Image (spheres, helix red, strand yellow):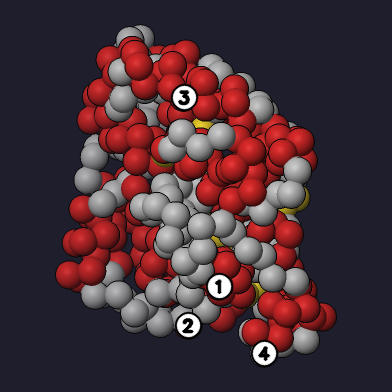
Amino acid sequence: MHSCLRLVKRRGIGSPFLATSCAHYFKETLRGAERYGLKVDYLLQQSGLSKEELNTPGWRGPSEKLAHLVQQVWLTLDDEFMGFTQHRCKPGTFAMMCHLIIHEVSIGRALSKGILYYNLFTDDIRMQLIEVEKGDQLIFEVVFARPDLDPHNYFLEFWLSIWYRLICWLAGRKIPIQEARFHYSRPDDRVEEFRYMFPTTHLFDQQVTRFVFSRELLTTPIVRSKPELKSMLALAPLGFMVVPSDESSYGRKIRSYVLATKSSQLSFPQFEHMAEVLGLSPQTLRRRLKEEGTSFRNVVEGIRRDVAIQHLVRTRQPVARISEIVGYSETRAFTRAFHTWTGMSPRTYRKTFLERTRHE
């Protein structure tokens, strides 16, 4: 789901950086289990988590722990819908659907068969693929029969994330979303995360929740094989909880360029220089990034935040030094930015993390 989930690798300053997720998604993962009257302390303990950290403002956790928590809920409830629908969905259902569609030649045929598969056995989640004759658009629409069982739209976002990442995985690249429409109001507590989960323009308070793609998606070939599917499913749900990478995207190219240096601290190029490196004019690069649902500033800030968090929790370096590593000349400016990213100061974030690990 989420990135809220961002995967960053940094060569020269330590081991690979993990994707992280905001506390909202950890807490909401448990809501379905709580509705069934289950005690969630055990589920948290099994995933190396505690209620205290989940309730800490601005806390973020690694995607591995969130994926493990999701697995615990799946197995405990015997339900891939995680208790957010009226009827349960046996674990293995999604995998069986993937095995059914992997033999199709195009994304359009795979989506149509996958949607039919789910619509045949459940009325809890209704999906449809709509071809818009005017405008050359393809709409992927999702409606929950009992939205009251998912009051914060957690599982709806999880479901959208899984299907979007499946589409990208089948195509072997990140598929652009032209527009994302949501039937509920703007979630201010995580709207920042949407930029990474669903990189596009977001519209809220719409009639129905739907993703708008280009109709070209219908004929986009599937490049994956059955052995690759088995490997992908073996990592589920972690593989669906990281932003789908696209080595050809310009945001990814900028990120790779910045993180490729072996220097002990980050160095960010000027935007004009980055455009020259990529063989584009500044205007074209700005437009391409906008089409990908991001900007040069967003890419830079995403790198800074994830690198800063990992140094705070993995090293004993002073905040002033971490500030320098991520490219801030003044510690105060870094502290303000970090508070914007996480809701707390760097020192408080580190203290909270260390106190949690002592009790694990």
Sequence-first disc among 4 and 3: 4
Image quadrant assignment for residue 249? bottom right
Q: Amino acid at mark 3?
A: Phe
Labelled disc at residue 279: 4
Sequence-first disc among 4 and 1: 1
**Where is 4 relative to 116, above or below?**
above
Say whether marks 3 and 1 touch (CB < 8 Å).
no
- Give the residue at mark 1: 257
Q: Nearer the viewer, mark 2 or mark 4?
A: 4
From the top left corner, tell me how far across and down residue 334 is, in percent: 71, 41
x 49%, y 42%: residue: 311
Secondary structure, mark 3, is helix
Residue sitting nearer the eye, 47 or 32:
47
Residue sitting nearer the eye, 4 or 88:
4
Q: Nearer the viewer, mark 2 or mark 3?
A: 3
Distance from the alpha carbon under mark 3 to that under mark 1 = 30 Å
Sequence-first disc among 2 and 3: 2
Labelled disc at residue 353: 3
Sequence-first disc among 3 and 1: 1
Distance from the alpha carbon under mark 1 to that under mark 2 = 32 Å
Sequence-first disc among 1 and 2: 2
Secondary structure, mark 1, is helix
Distance from the alpha carbon under mark 4 to that under mark 3 = 42 Å
Image quadrant assignment for residue 239? bottom left
Distance from the alpha carbon under mark 2 to that under mark 3 = 47 Å
The answer to whether residue 236 is left or right of residue 278 is left
Counting every numbered tag in the picture gives 4
x 65%, y 84%: residue: 277
